[in-house]
Image (cartoon, rainbow, N blue to C red):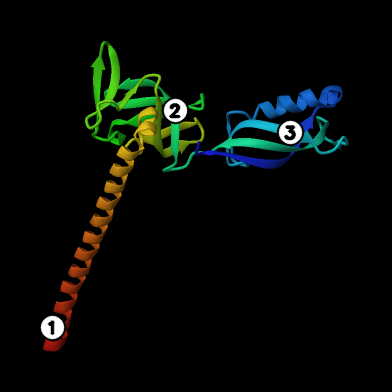
Amino acid sequence: MAGLEECEANLVVFLHPSKANCASDAILSELSSLLFTYNETFGGVVLAYDPSIRSNLAKIVPGTFPCFGVQLKAKLLLFNPKPDMVLEGEVVKLTPNSIHAVVLGFSSAVIADDDIRDEFKHKVKGGEEVYVSRTHRKHKIKVGAILRFTVKSFDEEILHISGSLLAPHTGGARWLDKNTDEWSRADSTATKRNTDKLLINGDTSMKNDEQIEKPKKRRRQQS
């Protein structure tokens, strides 16, 4: 899934001298404090680690509270979603104005009403809330389903994702996987429409520039 990456880091873990006889356990305990928090040094949320001690020798650090530093080399699995990345999460709540999901079991994601394309309509069937596509009746989003969406923003402090379902390749992951031709055709149509708009706007801008330039030339001739 997008947003996941591996990296190798050289670390120094500082331990109290009383931990010398159980240094391995103490190191793992210190590393576990990094889990599921955003770390600016590594540039992502630490999801897993695989450490290896580089040397059996440790450096004593003097001070009011003495400790010794153990050098490590660790492989880290990081999560760092960026705008326009495609993520998947399990739908946990639906309302008429929003869709709520959980990504990787820890990060909450919300798609607000403005970011849900008009194709989807909120309904209540048998007491169960569901979003149903107006175009493809079998394309549904309900609690427990896997949602595929694009990232708008990521709050690093509370690990909250703001998502979007405006793109044709977003929605219920199961339906999207089974109907690739349907949404890819819609995706290419939307891309062409946006390109045509850019060309039209560019042409209009050029004409306006020409119209502005012509009076200038006339004024020069009159003077």
Residue 218, which numbered label?
A: 1
Q: Amino acid at mark 3?
A: Pro
Is 65 situated left or right of 103 in this image? right
User: Does 20 sit above or below residue 60?
Assistant: above
Q: Amino acid at mark 2?
A: Gly
User: Does 194 sit above or below residue 19?
Assistant: below
Determine whether the residue tagged by mark 2 lies in a helix, strand or loop.
strand
Q: Whole-percent x and y of residue 131?
A: 28, 24
Q: Amino acid at mark 1?
A: Arg
Question: Which residue is identified by label 3?
Answer: 51
In primary-sequence order, the first of circles 2 and 3 is 3
The residue drawn where x is 15% and y is 78% is 214
In primary-sequence order, the first of circles 2 and 1 is 2
In primary-sequence order, the first of circles 1 and 3 is 3
User: Does 138 sit above or below residue 199?
Assistant: above
Determine whether the residue tagged by mark 1 lies in a helix, strand or loop.
helix
> Can residue 223 be seen by looking at this rendering?
no
